[in-house]
Amino acid sequence: MMWLITGVKVYLHAVIDNFSRRILAWQLAERLDPLRTCEVLAEAGKAVGCLPTVVADSGVENVNGRVDEQVETGVLRRILALVEVTFSNSMIEAWWRSLRHQWRNLHMLDSLGSVKRLVAFYVEQLGTVMPHSAFIGQTPDEIYFGTGGHVPAELKAAHQVARRRRLAENRAVRCRLCDPMDRPPMQLLPAQGTLGLQ
């Protein structure tokens, strides 16, 4: 749920692939409607291409008559996090947290249309541009489609080149006090001079 600056609530439904962290489907609605959950789950199920197992919390948007019907027809399996299993639905919760802190709080949300454009941009950038630390530099899309296998080796090679260049540049820098060729001549104090403290 998000609040617009007009005081209106909008609801964002999203499904994430736990393996790749790729958003498989999402929808934005002006009211909390179980039909939206069913639609986004069906869309995500088509993207996976097999019987998906959905790990969800037991919120009213995930546990209701419509979603229960969808589960009973065999379109998907639903596991309730921290109810039917001991683990949580932490992958999507981490995505919600990054959405809130890295995106939502930085924008003026004034209409459903502007929120939809911003979410579409965020999902696209997160999937195709932003590398994920769990994947050693690969993006969620590269993991999902299996196209980023070369990225870790390229990053390692680039890191080694950058490290060698940085070491060479640092070793080439000399200060005037350390280099005898650049050291200014020392001035000696007069031999008869005395110093005293008061």
Image: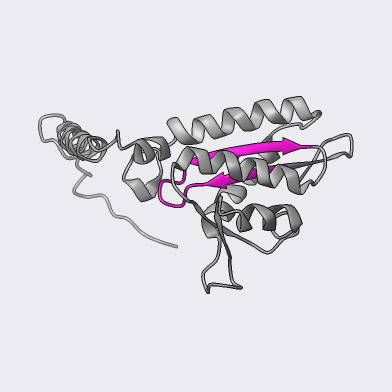
Quadrant housing residue 27:
top right
Which residues lie in the magenta part?
Answer: 12-29
Q: Is residue 111 magenta?
A: no
Quarter location, residue 196: bottom left
Question: Can residue 91 be seen by looking at this rendering?
Answer: yes
Judged left or right of residue 74, residue 153 is left
Magenta region, main secondary structure = strand
Residue that sits furthest to the front in the current view: 73
Residue 99 appears in the figure: no
Judge left or right: residue 16 versus residue 3: left
* Residue at the spot 68% in from the left edge and 55% down from the top edge: 69
Report which quarter residue 132 is drawn in.
top left
173 vs 51: above or below: above
- Which residue is nearer to you in this view: 73 or 145? 73
Query: Which one is nearer the viewer's eye here, 186 or 143?
Result: 143
Q: Position of residue 59 (x, y in %)?
A: 72, 60
